[in-house]
Structures are given as C-alpha cells and as structure tokens.
Amino acid sequence: MPTGDVPRAHALLAAIQPTGSGDEGLLFKILPALLKGAGQSRGAAIEALHPERPVSIGLSLSPSALVQMTEQLMAAGHLASGARLAGGPFFDGEEPATDPRVIPITAGDETLAYLVLPEAPEDPNGFASVVAHAASILAWVRMTEKVREADFELKYRVWELESLYEVGLSIAGTLDLESLADEILMKSVSLLNARSGVLIVKQRDVEGEAYVKEFGGAFPGLVPGAALPSEVCVANRSAERPSFLAGAFGEKLLAVPIVSEGAPIGVLVVADKENRAGGVEDFDAGDARILSLFGNQAAIALENARLHREAVEKERMEKEIELAASIQRTILPASLPDVPGVVLCGANRPTRQVGGDFYDVFPLADSRVGFVVADVSGKGVPAALLVSTLHACLHLLFDFGSGDLASVVARINRHLVRFSTTRKFATLFLAVFDATSRELRYVNAGHNPAILLSGAEVTLLGPSGVPVGMFPAAVHREESRVVSAGDLLVLYSDGITEALDASDGEFGMERLTELVVSSDEASPAGLTNGIFRAVDEFTRGVAQYDDQTVLVARFA
Amino acid sequence: MSERLTVTVERPDQIVAILRPDGYINASGGEEIAKEAYALLGDGVVNLLLDLERTRIVNSIGISILIEILEKVLDQKGRLAFCRLTPTIEKTFQIMGLAQYARLFPAVDPALAWLRGETE
C-alpha cells in the first residue's frame, strides 16, 4: 500500500481558495488532497448538510448509484457512526476494499463531511492533521454560509418592517381602497413567499356581495353562505380547511380575519408558501403573525374609508340642510302686511333638519285677504323645493283672481301630482276673509283643524279634502262661515300639537284649544308667543323634531 | 402581467443582453431568469440587464436567486443592472443588498450605457 504524502496533502489544501458559500465544487477540490494524505487512489466524500451531492475519485460507480449508496448508508446510520463499513458497498464490483471505513471530518462538535476510504491510512497521526486542515476549510465555508444566512434573515426582517411601515403610510395618505387593497395583498404574498393570495371584504348591508382583490388564480371566490372566520386559520392540510375556503385551489392556506367594529367583515388569505427547492411548506405561527399585521392594516384602511365616506355624507347633508333652510327663509314672509278687517300674526320655528312648514298672507282686491298655513311631507331639500313650488302656485293663482278656493286647491293638486318627482304631498289650510261681508271661506286639505273662537264658543274647522299631491282626481270642498268682530282664528302645523315631552307625551289638540280659550292675550302676537311659550314649557328641553308654525287672525 | 413568469431575451450586441421577465419573481420565476442568465454567461455574455418593467412582485426566494445570478456575473468579471423597477421593488432591492453590487436605473438606455462601460 502506498504511503501517504502528508506534506503534499497539506500543500494541496493550502492552495484551495474557496469562494465562500455556494462553492459546490469544494469537496471535489478537497478529496484529492485527502486521498494523497491517506496514500490511496480511490475514495468518496460526502458533505453532511448536502448528502445528495457526494463526490468520488477512482470509483466505477455512476453518479446516481453513488447518491443511492450514500442515502442507504445515511439511513442505516453507518456514516454517522464512523464505523468500518460492512461489505464496503462503495467498492463492490471492482477490486474489493480490504478494510473500508468512514472517517468523519469534524470541527468542534460539528461533523462537516464524511470521507469513505477502502483502507485505513498508514499514518493515522499524519493523516489526522490533513483531515483537520480540510475541516478548517469546510468550517470557514460553513461559517460564511451562516453569516450570509443571518445577514439575509436580518435584511428580510427589515424588509418586513419597511413593508408594514409603507402600508401604514399609504393608509394615512390615501382613501383609494383599490390601490390600498392591491398594496396589502401584494406585500402579503411576497413577504410570505406565497404563490397566490386573495383579499375579500363583504359589502355592508348587501348580502352575498363582496369586494375581491386576487392574485395568482387560486381563489374562485367566497363560498355562498359560508361564514367568514373570526380567528386566524392555518390550514396546511385539506382537513383543516374552513368551509369558506373549500373551493380554493391552493394546497396549504393561511387566512386571517379582517375585523371592523368587533365583527369579521373580510378575510386575507395566502396560499402555498414555497421553498428554495420549488416545493411548498407549512405556514407557521410567524407567518400567521405577519399576515395578521397586514390584516389589521386592511381593517384600518377600510375603517378610514368608511369614516371618510360618513364625513363626506355628513358634509353633504349639512349643505343640503343649509340650502333647504335658505329656500325656506326666502319664502317665509319677513313681515305681514296690514290688511283691512283683520289683525294677523305668524311665526315659524324650524327644526335643524329643515322641514316643510310655511305660511303666508296675500292682500287681495276689494277688502279681501288670503292666508295659508301649509305643511309639506319630508325634510331637507326635496321638501323645501315642494314648499317653493306650492308658494309659487299660490301666489300665481291668487294674483290672477282664481275664483273659488276649491278650484285653486284642485289646480295646485293636479300640478303637484303631475310634476312632483319625489312622491311628496302637502297639507294646507287656505282661507280668504272678506272684510266687507265678514265671510270667511276656506279649504282644509288634510291639515290640522283650525280653531275658531267666537266668544266662548270653540269651533274646529276640520278637513274638507285630502292633502294635495296625492291623488290627481282629489276633490276639495270649500266651506264658509260668517265671523264676528273679535273672533279669533288659530292656524297651526302639527309640529305644535305633536311636540313631545320627555315621556313621549304629546302637547295635543286639547291642550292647544284650552290655551286659546283661556288666554287673556288680546293681540294675535301675544297669543302666538304664548303658544310657543307653552310648547317650550311642555317639552322642557326635549329636542324639536318638526317645524312649528302658528298663524293667528283676530277679526276686527 | 401574468403570474407565471416568462422571460424574453434580447441581444443588442455581443457585449450586453437584456432579459425581460414578465410575472412574479418567485422560486419558479427566479429559476426561469437564472436559466436564461446562465445560458448567456456560458455563451460569453457577461453584462446583463434585467428590465423589470413587467414585474411588480418579487419574494425572498426570487431575491436569493437574483443574488446568486449577481455573484456568478461578478465571478466572471461582468456587470449586472436592473431597470424600470417599481418603487416598491427598488426599495426591496436596496434593503436586501442587491443594489450594493448591481446598479439600478430608471430606463433601458442609461443601463446599457453603463453595462458597456460608456458611463460610470
């Protein structure tokens, strides 16, 4: 048996310049030196961390056979034991080895590689120094690999944090849900090394509808009727898969809920975490933590967008209220005209949500005066526009001397039914007083009964027809009566009689009538103020929810 | 952009080659790029430009493959450049160290000029 050339072996090892991690040919460079030191011409070397890449010199085995034998030896534990190889499988089929053995190449407690020789080296001490030299080279490469892996891991963590930070900035800087959802989904997929992902958010108040952002084609959509998860779901096996993901194509899934106001409104899912070898591996707790962070950010983004929408809607409504209020302010009379035979006083107290009350007085020819109190259904701009229409109709019709009040109301009714697109209607009490004949003619179209006080006698002038704007063929009846000097007529809207106190009790018709009868106020202004005072005392600070209008006429 | 990555290769001259990946640079996508890159290196073309205009997502495995390509290019004394990266990918490359040994450009022409040694 040739003797080993230990100095030559050391020289060969010293000439090796490893390129660091990834130097897959390093063992092939080391093996000749080891064989030189052992004084042998054939052998194999197997890297401990990569047993799938054994190298050999002087063997007649094919590469695949070499790999197969290596796997068998690993499985049987023969490599780790460093024992003499039973049967010398590496060397079968050629000159049999007399004493095949495995020599571990170690640095400290770590075995870096295995050397397989057909015989034991003649100079074990000298050969041991060659093995130690080879071990130092392999240890250096292994250390650079670890440093490189640690560096990569550190940079990956920075990447993770930076991604979360960027999403946070985006949430603060935009309300574009489309781009935010895209950013959150892309970052989730890339950071978790997933192959695909989906972000699903259910539409509020629309059952079965969902906003879906998808990447990678693994998710056909929500399973109809399936409940969204309220907890993190790690489904690395099919049996672990929740029902709502039953249709997903991915092999391994990780899902986190998107929660808003304590309830799940969506889900963020990624599928198939891939590894370097091209396969997929299980999602773990660390992955769930990262995805949960992105899920939380998605929830914040959605909440921001919702709050913004609400703020925009609130601003729009406030502008609408202001517009409606300005319309109403232009319609309500700033002051009432002096007309013969009657003293009038009117007042309107609108709510914050502008309603549709209005009142007006129309001086007419021949000692006549017309007056009206009306209440349009609904609130806001649509009601204000109808008030404006009604106001214009009344002024036009009275100006042209329209004749009897029933025909006036009938024309108004037909106009509102035909041209109002908002399905709104109005109650009104329209009256004309002739100071010469002392005749009071009126039409009550579905309005509250007017209170006529003549001495101590109270008469309620109730409806003589339905509200205007409801039915095209509605018929309204004109009523009339003669009033005496000193008689009092009180018109009002239901905001007065339906004013509520703290226990939801109504001010009521009876209380108003009693107030009118018992009032010692001689002037309409005094009585008007008295009515509003009484309502305020009754409601005791409960918020007003409807317009309140009063028009009082004292006939001279 | 398709999720399964494809790569087109353009060789404007003997000095440089342009690889244009279209899709997700993950494990399989990275391997596709590596296959084309190593073929070019084997052909003696050591100055490579990766035009990432049609890539908007890359994961850590894709990045590690790009780093391996970069190491092999540098081993052969070549140059590697990237161009038309999205802001997100550019920041990722800077964090992960790719920008330390490769150059990032906003457009193809300045990248090619650098690869050809016409600029520094």
Image (tube, coloured by chain):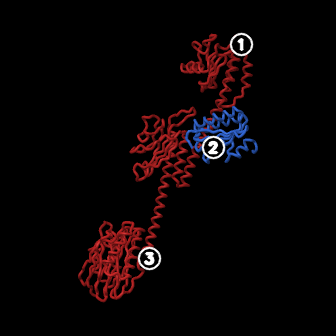
Chain colours: A red, B blue
| A177 with respect to B85 (left or right) | left
Q: Mark 3: which amino acid?
A: Thr
Above or below A388: residue A132: above
Judging from the image, what secondary structure is the residue with disc 1 in? loop
Left or right: A51, with A542 as reference point? right
The amino acid at mark 2 is: Leu
What's the distance in space between the residues labelled 1 and 3, CA to CA? 118 Å
Residue furthest right as drawn: B118
Can see residue B38?
yes
| Closer to us: A125 or A101 | A101
- For residue A34, what is the image quadrant? top right
> Is there any visible trace of residue A525 in the rendered image?
no
In the rendered structure, find residue A231 and report the number of the disc placed on it. Answer: none
Badge 3 local density, few (<14 within 10 Å), some, or many (20+)?
A: few
Q: Which residue is the site of mark 3?
A: A330
Q: Nearer the viewer, residue A197 or A350?
A: A197
Q: Is residue A224 above or below residue A488?
A: above
Mark 3 and mark 2 on one chain: no
